[in-house]
Image (cartoon, rainbow, N blue to C red):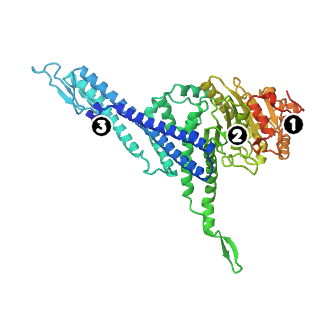
Amino acid sequence: MDYTALKNLRTSDFEKASRGYRATSNMANAAKEALERRIAVKMRESLSGVAAKAALHQLRELAKDFHYTQVECGVISTALNALASDLQAAKKKLDAAVADAEGEKLTVETDGSVTYPAGGDKYQGKTPPGGTVNGVTDETAKALHRQAARFHPNPHYARAQKYADRIAVALEEATEADEKWAPKLRKLRADDDLAVSAADWVDAQKDTGGVRDGADHYLDGIKSPPKDGDPEDNAEWWKHLSADQRDAYIALHPASIGAMNGLPADARDEANRTVLAETRGQYEMKLNAIPKEPSPQFVPIGARGDMTYSQEWLDWHGKYSERKEYLEEKLKGMRAIQDRFDRTGENGLPEAYLLGFDPDGEGNGRIILANGNPDTADHTAIYVPGTTTDISTIGEDSGDTPSDLKRSESLWNESARLAPGQKISTITWLDYDAPDIIPEATSDRYAEKGAPILHHFLEGNRTAHQYASGETGHTTVIGHSYGSTLIGDTAKTAGWNETPIPADDVLVAGSPGMQADHAADLGIDPKHMWAMGGGSDDFIVRHGGYLSGLGDNLVIPTDPEFGGNIMTSDAGGHGAFWDTEGGQASLSLKNQARVVVARYGDVTLDSKAHW
């Protein structure tokens, strides 16, 4: 970049363009939310049939367009701000050098060179003449100029050279910024069609990476997130960022923002939806790149017509089968999340908030999905699933047994029915490596590893609510099966100045044990400890805790000596605590909802032991 261009540059033009793209991004987001959370909801409430389904499908496709527009315009906005920041830094150096030179009666020429007047002691009756110098940026050249200045008869020479060098440095930095950002901005272009494909989302992910790599200087001007901060640190950091700075972090670091406990649910949701869309596009492209399975799988051998695997199929199977299965399983979980988004409004279901997503997080994948905004909820329930839970199965019903995501939905419906006019949020929390098979569920190591993660999330949930609403609200943490063991370890992992379980009530269903003799040993008030059991295989699971050691000293939460409220239950099996029939909640589900909305007096208790 030449001197005249930088001298006349108005970085405010880039900032104005950035604001325009940001406004477009915000408008696209508003349109997407209007489609998903209002228009589609009203259509589901009032329309049905083939035509209505087709219309809803088109609305979902249009929402994808707006989402893609939101993400790309957000990246462009941040890129323009980063470009303006880089150029502004160079321009400030230039303007300061020019002002200093002119203050000493030196003249800055249109090419950036500096002219100095005649001056110094006369020699043979003549004053040393003036001249013009050009700046250099090479350190060796600068050193030579400094050496020459010591012997130069005109004292203005040294000052002129100093300012010329400063101008050269500013021009070099501006040129580097221009050369860095020009190709990045040229790449920020979308296809000329209205269909957002997997390739489009992969391209968006690349765009984000490219801008992120170049935006170091711009982000350096923003206070960085606290390193290993607790939820309070995170919330304070976010609180003191401007709207543009928050947008920049969401645009360039969506995975990091989406995982930060203590941040507002809507910010985490926006970030994680971007991560979900881009990851799904990436996985779909990888799956589509796998060659089709060869056919036939078997070929005849020998005169008798015996069959064996074809070599072509064996080669394909050895190279692609495991990879294909892995991608399909992960995509199954991603589709389950999208399905929940698409069902907002169905049977009164509130908007969904994706508070955590990573297809490979903690081994089984991370999915933290809320029904309703927990930051503003009067009552929040956090459901922790147990053994065999995985990203691929979290949204999958098993016969008559509802999926983990559906269990949270049923709990939301019944809780909302019991507390009309109050805001309810139910969260499915999978952010630990749940045991994959039953024998693994006899070990505590999965709970021990996941406990600090759950504690951090619970603290973050409470902090985000406090910052949004000024109070903490009422929270119930619910553990099913091995999830209850994890809750027990969570209480043990708390520091000396931390609440063992940052929740008001603890409820466990089908618990094989929390590795404690009494609720009070975990720092849980027995009056706010709730347990229920079921029949058939649930009885086997719970009492298996005696043998595995998860039931400390042969005590599990449904034993009277554990010291909690034992709730009556009509669950016929281990997965039946959230059953509904004909739209009516089971007694087990009703009792859970009564605790969630703090209607403790309505909970039906087993006569064996209660408070």
The picture places residue 11, in percent across and down from the top left corner, at 35, 32
* Residue 329, above or below 586: below
Which amino acid, mark 3? Met
Residue position for label 3: 1
What residue is at 70 percent from the left and 40 percent from the top?
408
Hey, which residue is sitting farthest right in the picture?
Answer: 608
The picture places residue 566, in percent across and down from the top left corner, at 84, 33
Q: Is residue 297 left or right of residue 149?
A: right
- Residue density around tag 3, few if under 14, some if 14–19, many if 20 or more, within 10 Å: some
- Mark 2 / mark 1, whichever is N-terminal: 2
Mark 1 to mark 3 CA distance (whole Å): 77 Å
Residue position for label 2: 408
Which amino acid, mark 1? Leu
Element type where label 3 sits in the image? loop
Element type where label 1 sits in the image? helix
In terms of image quadrants, where is residue 303? bottom right
Q: Is residue 512 left or right of residue 396?
A: right
